[in-house]
Image: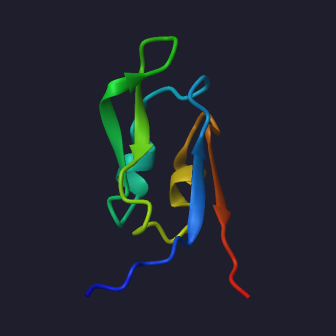
Amino acid sequence: MEAKKEKKGEVIIDENSCQGCGYCVLSCKRGCIEISGKKMNSKGISLPILVKPDECNACGGCAVMCPALSIEVYAITFK
C-alpha cells in the first residue's frame, strides 16, 4: 500500500487578476501547475490550475514569477 503524501502548502490563484501569461507554469519545477483548457475567468483568459497539489512543496516560485501578483502560496507547518 502506498503512503499518502501530506500536503505541504496551499496555492491560491486570484482568477480575476490572472493574465494567463503562464509564467507560473514555467517556474514550477515539479510541474504542479498547468494552464486549463476549460477554466476561464470573466475576461476569457485560460486560468492556471494546481494539478498536483500533493507534489507542491510550497516553494513560492509561481507567486514570485507572477507579474500580476495573482498567486499566493501558504506553507503548512506541522507540529
Quarter assignment of residue 32: bottom left
Quarter occupied by the C terminus: bottom right
Left-right relation of 21 to 68: left
Percent x, y of residue 20: 43, 29
Q: Residue at horizontal 39%, vertical 79%? A: 4
Snapshot colouring? rainbow
Q: Residue furthest right?
A: 79
Looking at the image, residue 75 lies above or below residue 11: below
Q: Residue furthest front?
A: 1
Left-right relation of 34 to 8: left
Looking at the image, residue 19 lies above or below residue 9: above
Percent x, y of residue 46: 38, 25
Percent x, y of residue 60: 58, 61
Percent x, y of residue 66: 55, 43
Quarter assignment of residue 69: top right
Q: Residue at horizontal 53%, vertical 49%? A: 65
